Image (tube, helix red, strand yellow):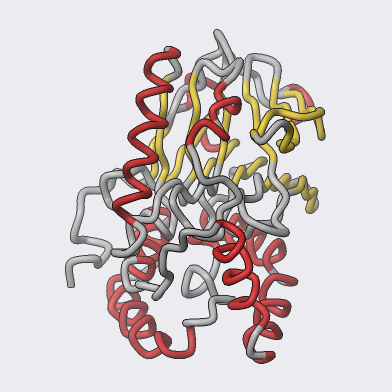
C-alpha cells in the first residue's frame, strides 16, 4: 500500500526555528475556491498579510482533493502566492485534509516541540468523523487503518501519514456555484439535513477539544501549545497544562482568528470583515513565552 507508514521518508514533522526578527502569522482553512467559503476573490483576504514577515498556511488552503474545485482553487492560490512574494512575505505551507499532498509539510515543531503547529485532522479517527460521507466510506477507511495498524501507529509521523491516507480517499461531490449565496446555503443544508447527519455533526463536534487533548497526550506529550484549524471552531482552550488555539475557518458559523508569533509570545487576533474584506481585528488573547516556560532564545537550540 503506497500510504503505509514505511512508504515515504520521514519528513512529515519538521523541527523549525522561529524567526524572532518579525511576525510569523498562522492562518488556516482559507479553502480557496470552495463554494462555502465566505470570499470569492483573493483580494478579499490580502489584508491578512499586513504586518507579517512570514505566514504559515496551516492546512485546507486549497481544494486538491476535489476534481471540480481544484482548478479555480489553485488559480486563486497562485494569485495569493504572487501577491505575497510581491510584498516580501514568506509562505510556509502545512497540509490539511482538503490539500493532502505529500509535498506539503505535516506539522511544525517549535522550541523542541513545546509548540506544535498542525492542521488537526490527525487528531480524529477518520480525519473528519462528523462528515456526512463517513457512513459510505467507513469500510474503505477501516481498510486503510488496518493496513497502518500492521506496522503500528505509534508516532506523530505515523498518525499524520494515516490522516493523509484517509484524506486522499475523500472525493466529496461538491460542485462549483456561480452564486456565493447558493454555495453557502448548500454547505449549511448539507450539514443540517437529513437529521441523522446533523446529529452526528453535533455529537462529534462536542468532543473535538477533548479528543485533541487525548491526541496530544499520546503523540506529542511535550507540547504545551497546539495551534490548529480543521474543526471550524475558533477559540483558545486551556485544558490542564495544555493550551489549544484554533484559528477557525473562512466558512459560515466558524469564526476566525490568526496567531501572531514573535520574540515575546503568541498574540491571538480576531479576523473581521469590513469594507468587503477580511482584516485583522482586536486582540483576543496574548500569551507570553515566559508564561509557557519557554525561553525563545535558549529553546531554539532544541530543534
Q: Nearer the viewer, residue 230 or 79?
A: 79
Residue situated furthest front in the rendering = 178
Placement of the N terminus among the 4 image quadrants: bottom left
- State left or right for residue 116 relative to residue 212: left
Residue shown at 42%/61% (left/top)? 159
Residue 172's quadrant in the figure? Answer: bottom left
Residue 174 falls left or right of residue 75: right
Q: Residue at x 32, y 42 (%)?
A: 75
Q: Is residue 284 above or below residue 1?
A: above
Q: For residue 186, which quarter of the picture?
A: bottom right
Q: Position of residue 243 (x, y in %)?
A: 73, 45
- Residue 224, position as x, y percentages in the image: 67, 41
**Residue 88, position as x, y percentages in the image:** 42, 12
> Residue at (18%, 60%) from the top-left corner?
7
Q: Is residue 12 left or right of residue 130?
A: left
Horizontally, residue 182 falls left or right of residue 109, namely right
Amino acid at each position: 500500500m503506497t500510504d503505509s507508514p514505511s512508504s515515504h521518508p520521514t519528513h512529515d514533522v519538521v523541527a523549525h526555528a522561529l524567526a524572532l526578527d518579525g511576525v510569523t502569522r498562522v492562518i488556516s482553512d482559507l479553502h480557496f475556491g470552495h463554494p462555502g467559503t465566505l470570499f470569492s476573490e483573493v483580494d478579499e483576504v490580502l489584508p491578512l498579510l499586513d504586518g507579517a514577515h512570514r505566514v504559515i498556511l496551516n492546512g485546507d488552503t486549497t481544494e486538491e482533493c476535489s476534481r471540480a474545485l481544484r482548478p479555480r482553487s489553485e488559480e486563486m492560490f497562485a494569485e495569493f502566492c504572487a501577491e505575497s512574494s510581491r510584498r516580501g512575505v514568506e509562505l510556509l505551507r502545512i497540509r490539511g485534509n482538503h490539500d493532502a499532498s505529500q509535498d506539503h509539510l505535516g506539522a511544525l515543531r517549535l522550541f523542541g516541540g513545546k509548540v506544535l503547529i498542525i492542521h488537526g485532522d490527525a487528531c480524529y479517527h477518520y480525519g473528519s468523523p462528523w462528515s456526512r460521507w463517513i457512513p459510505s466510506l467507513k469500510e474503505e477507511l477501516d481498510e486503510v487503518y488496518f493496513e497502518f495498524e500492521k506496522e503500528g501507529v505509534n508516532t506523530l509521523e505515523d498518525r499524520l501519514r494515516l490522516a493523509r491516507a484517509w484524506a486522499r480517499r475523500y472525493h466529496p461531490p461538491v460542485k462549483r456555484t456561480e452564486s456565493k449565496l447558493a454555495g453557502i446555503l448548500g454547505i449549511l443544508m448539507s450539514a443540517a439535513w437529513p437529521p441523522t447527519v446533523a446529529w452526528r455533526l453535533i455529537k462529534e463536534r462536542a468532543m473535538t477539544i477533548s479528543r485533541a487533548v487525548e491526541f496530544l497526550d499520546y503523540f506529542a506529550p511535550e507540547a504545551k501549545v497546539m495551534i490548529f484549524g480543521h474543526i471550524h471552531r475558533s477559540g483558545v482552550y486551556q485544558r490542564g497544562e495544555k493550551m489549544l488555539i484554533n484559528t477557525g475557518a473562512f466558512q459560515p458559523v466558524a469564526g476566525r482568528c490568526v496567531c501572531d508569533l514573535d520574540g515575546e509570545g503568541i498574540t491571538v487576533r480576531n479576523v473581521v470583515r469590513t469594507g468587503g474584506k477580511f482584516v485583522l481585528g482586536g486582540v483576543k488573547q496574548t500569551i507570553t513565552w515566559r508564561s509557557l516556560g519557554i525561553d525563545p532564545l535558549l529553546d531554539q537550540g532544541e530543534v
